[in-house]
Image (tube, grey):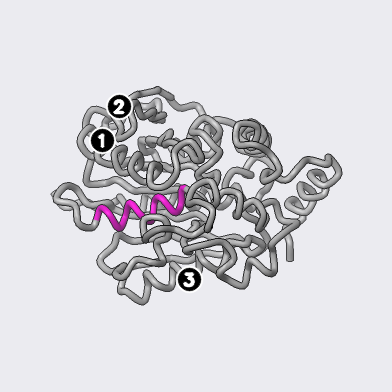
Amino acid sequence: MLDKQIATLLDMAKASGAPDLCELPPEVCRQVYSEIVRSSDLAAADVQIDERSIDGPGGALGLRIYTPRDAAATPRSAVLFLHGGGFVVGAPQDYDGLVSTLCRESDCVVVSVDYRLAPEHPFPAAVEDSEAAMGWLFDHASELGADARRVVVAGDSAGGNLAAVLALLNRSSEGPILAGQILLYPVTSERPGMFESYARYESGYFLTRGSMNYFSRHYHGPDLAAADWRGAPLLAEDVSELPPALVLVGGFDPLRDEGVAYARRLSEAGNQVMLVEYAGLTHGFMVMGGVVNAARLAVGQVASTVKLMTGAVVA
């Protein structure tokens, strides 16, 4: 059954006559997306927020760094966070409520990545920027009061795709290894519409099939298909020996089935996986914590999972 608070939001969106994002040019779509996210997200928690610019593959790469204000006796864990938005919209500051709350409740440093967006910067620009940010975080963790052995990668939707890809890329790294991956209703398939949940929820539940085609066209090109596994983790031949994973999906989300499929693939390959379905929620619920009670519970679950994933380190 659809969550009652979600149903109210859907009714309000329908009554407002707001256009589908796929009907807008990218620059306008970004403004509308930011307004939508900020209107439903949690209020920003009282944490320190700093901006940092590092050298990225395409030039300056922005990072938004969230740190608990209270002094820590030992180095904290850290989360590399990749925001959602179909690789076309979204920015770290849009997620201040969610990310600052995660920072405070998990008592960790969070580094949110302002990766390049399509269509100006199509695949694999977002992957390259995210990988550069992960390397930077490992190298500079101590400067942030964090422990490079206790880093978790997390992201929602498109960011969930990037988080899954980073976990795969990190597996062959000679440096520190990720302590966990948190995939929030991730994009994992080669192209939109490959799973049955698209047929069930292709319209009427915030994210639509048209929006996913719009995003994929801008990111992957006119055939809407990922070129390789860095655009679609389900294409990876080997998903074994990866860090523990938490995969969250919404019951009324076109992406539900591909998130479930990737969680099962990880489990079948011998990885530790926890798959949780928020049955009454839609796509994007992690940034609805300010108006949807179940979404607020999900934020708490993610914060608790960060603690579990990073709690034990062998000296």
User: Which segment is the magenta one?
Assistant: 159-170
**Residue found at x 56% / y 38%:** 89
Lateral position of residue 86 relative to residue 314, left or right: right
Mark number, residue 136: 1
Q: Amino acid at mark 3?
A: Ala
Residue 7, which numbered label? none
Q: Residue at x 67, y 39 (%)?
A: 40
Q: Is residue 163 magenta-colored? A: yes
Whether tag 1 and tag 2 are in contact, CB under 8 A, the answer is: yes
Can you give x and y, in whole percent of width and height, for residue 100 in the image?
A: 48, 34
What's the residue at 41%, 48% (across, down)? 154
Q: Position of residue 288 (x, y in %)?
A: 64, 44
N-term mark: 3 or 1:
1
Q: Which residue is mark 3?
A: 261
Element type at mark 3? helix
Mark earlier in primary sequence (2, 3): 2
